[in-house]
Image: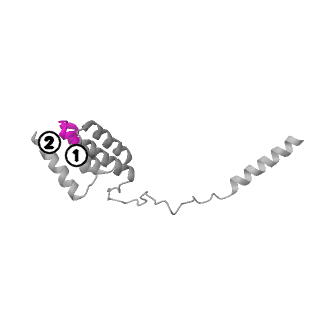
Amino acid sequence: MNHYKIAIVCLSSFLWACSTQPTAPVTDPTIPSTINTSKNSTDNSVKRSSALSSLLSLSEQQENSGNLQGATRSLERAIRISPRNPEVYLRLAELNERQGKTAQAHSFAEKALSLNPNSALTNQAESLLDKLEQQ
């Protein structure tokens, strides 16, 4: 008999919980939202996060010190953080071109162009592609 009462209480609690309306997600106003909710957004420029900025700075330092492989790894990590950022692809294209990897450089420059970069990045990517085609 006691099990019967426990089963009734559990079933009632379960049904009551299922019948209530879910609460709206709690948003913290101190944390900025980085999600673009616009469905028709044509601007693919991506604001830099602090992690992305750190990786870009690190890759520049590594490149300046001659550590081209380390710079490449840092830029590849930056792509994982911000896969739609054309600047990262352009910098990776330039780095591959410096290493003599023209096929990869060409591929990364094309990717940078496909991500609708601003005119300065477009000019840089197009001039790099022209240089690669002349090699």
* Residue 99 point in image, percent of width and height: 19, 37
* Quadrant where the image shows the C terminus: top left
Q: Are marks 1 and 2 in contact (CB under 8 Å)?
A: yes
Q: Determine if the magenta segment contains residue 103.
A: yes
Q: Give the magenta-colored segment's residue range.
A: 95-107
The secondary structure type at the circle numbered 2 is helix
Res. 39 image quadrant: bottom left
The image quadrant where one finds the N terminus is: top right
Residue 3 location (% of width, % of height) = 85, 41
Horizontal side of residue 113 vs 15, given as left or right = left
What kind of residue is marked 2? Leu
First reached walking from the N terminus: tag 1 or tag 2: 1
Give the residue number, with chain letter if any, for mark 2: 132
Instruction: Return the residue nearer the eye: 19 or 43.
Output: 43
Residue at x 38% of width, y 47% of height: 81
Which residue is located at x 31 percent, y 43 percent? 75
The residue lying furthest to the left in this view is: 134
Where is residue 44? Give x, y as percent: 32, 56
Quadrant of res 27:
bottom right
Q: Is residue 24 left or right of residue 89?
A: right
- Residue at position x 25%, y 58% in the image: 118
Residue 40, image x, y percentages:
37, 60
Residue type, mark 1 in image: Ala
Q: Is residue 77 left or right of residue 32?
A: left
Q: Main secondary structure of the magenta part?
A: helix
Q: Residues within 10 Å of mark 2 (few under 14, many from 20)?
A: some
The residue that disc 1 covers is 109
